[in-house]
Each structure stands twice: as C-alpha cells, then as structure tokens.
Image (cartoon, rainbow, N blue to C red):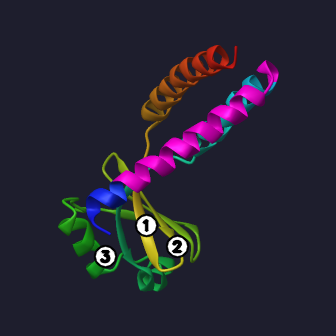
C-alpha cells in the first residue's frame, strides 16, 4: 500500500471518528456537555500547573545515579550543549530521588523526569506563561463549548 492510499485511509478513519463523536454529542444533554467541557478545562489546568513545557530532548536514564549524588554528569552537560543550551553555572536540585531533578541556569529551570527508557528534559514554565496558557485555554474552551452547544440544538 502506497503513501497516497495510507493517507486516504487515514482521512476516512478520521471522518468516521468525527461522525461517532458528533453522534455522541447529539445524544448528550446541554448540562452533560457543559460538565464535560468543565472537566476538560480542569484536566488542562492541571497539566499546565505541572510547570512543564514541551520536551526539549531525552537523555540516557543511566545519568540518574550521578544526579542522585548531586552531580551533573559531563556527558549530560554535553547533551544540553548539543541542544543549544548553555550550562555555565548550573545548580542541581533533587526533587524525587531516581525520578525527578531540576537544573537551574540563570533564570531558566530545566526539569528532568526519568521515564521507562530515558530521562526527559523540559523547560519549566514561568508563572506568566502558565497564566497566559490558562487564559488561552479558557477562550478556546468557551468557543468550543458554544460551537458544541449550537451543534447540539
């Protein structure tokens, strides 16, 4: 099966999914729709409150031993450099041993979270960015809710 055929099949699957979602929405009461939107807003707020931006890069999970000792391994520093992040005078905080650490360099804080196979490195979001994202989320949520309720009528 060639790429055009795969794209066509994916489009058809997406159309079917949208039809099912539309069918489910038309079966919901207005209050159920409002409750669902509220639940989604809460979930998104909670994700934003986790302070993490997108994953910048991933690193070897074996760095966790040194990180637990309060040491930023040289090879990990190199991974930051490769990703165009300078660590001139970094400080390391152990948040949860074997799971979560933070590296602060100047005004930036990088969150390191150990997953099954790798350590994911993300930029910790500032309070201003979190506030702006929550504001945008509410605007999108209101618009989506209005459109959904109109579809429901």
**Which stretch did the figure color magenta?**
8-31
The CA distance from mark 2 to mark 1 is 7 Å
Q: Mark 1 points at which residue?
A: 120
Mark 2 Cα shell of 10 Å, populated few (<14), some (14-19), many (≥20): few
- Residue sitting at 52 percent across and 19 percent down? 139
Confirm or deny contact between disc 2 and disc 1 (CB under 8 A).
yes
Q: Mark 2 points at which residue?
A: 115
Q: Which of marks 1 and 3 is nearer the N terminus?
A: 3
**Label 1, label 3: how far apart the Cα atoms are:** 12 Å
Picture coordinates of residue 89, whole percent (x, y):
27, 62
Residue at left 51%, top 24%?
140
- CA gap between label 2 and label 3 equals 16 Å
Q: Mark 1 Cα within 10 Å, few/some/many (few <14, many 20+)?
A: many
Residue found 68% across the figure and 29% down from its top = 37
Residues at marks 1 and 3 touching, judged by CB atoms closer than 8 Å: no
x, y percentage for residue 128? 44, 30
Q: Is residue 123 visible?
A: no
Q: Position of residue 99 (x, y in %)?
A: 57, 72
Mark 2 or mark 1: name the one nearer the start of the chain: 2
Q: Disc 2 or 3, which lies upstream in sequence? A: 3
The N terminus is located in which quarter?
A: bottom left
Q: Name the residue under label 3.
A: 76
Write down the quadrant of residue 126 in the picture. Answer: top left
């Amino acid at each position: 099966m060639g790429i055009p055929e795969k794209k066509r099949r994916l489009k058809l699957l997406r159309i079917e999914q949208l039809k099912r979602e539309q069918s489910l929405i038309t079966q919901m009461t207005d209050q159920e729709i409002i409750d669902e939107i509220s639940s989604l807003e809460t979930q998104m707020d909670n994700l934003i409150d986790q302070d993490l931006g997108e994953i910048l890069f991933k690193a070897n999970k074996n760095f966790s031993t040194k990180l637990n000792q309060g040491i930023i391994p040289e090879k990990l520093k190199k991974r930051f450099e490769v990703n165009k992040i300078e660590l001139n005078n970094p400080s390391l905080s152990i948040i949860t041993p074997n799971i979560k650490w933070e590296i602060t360099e100047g005004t930036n804080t990088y969150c390191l979270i150990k997953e099954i196979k790798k350590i994911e490195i993300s930029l910790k979001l500032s309070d201003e960015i979190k506030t702006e994202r929550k504001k945008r989320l509410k605007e999108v949520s209101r618009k989506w809710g209005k459109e959904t309720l109109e579809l429901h009528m």
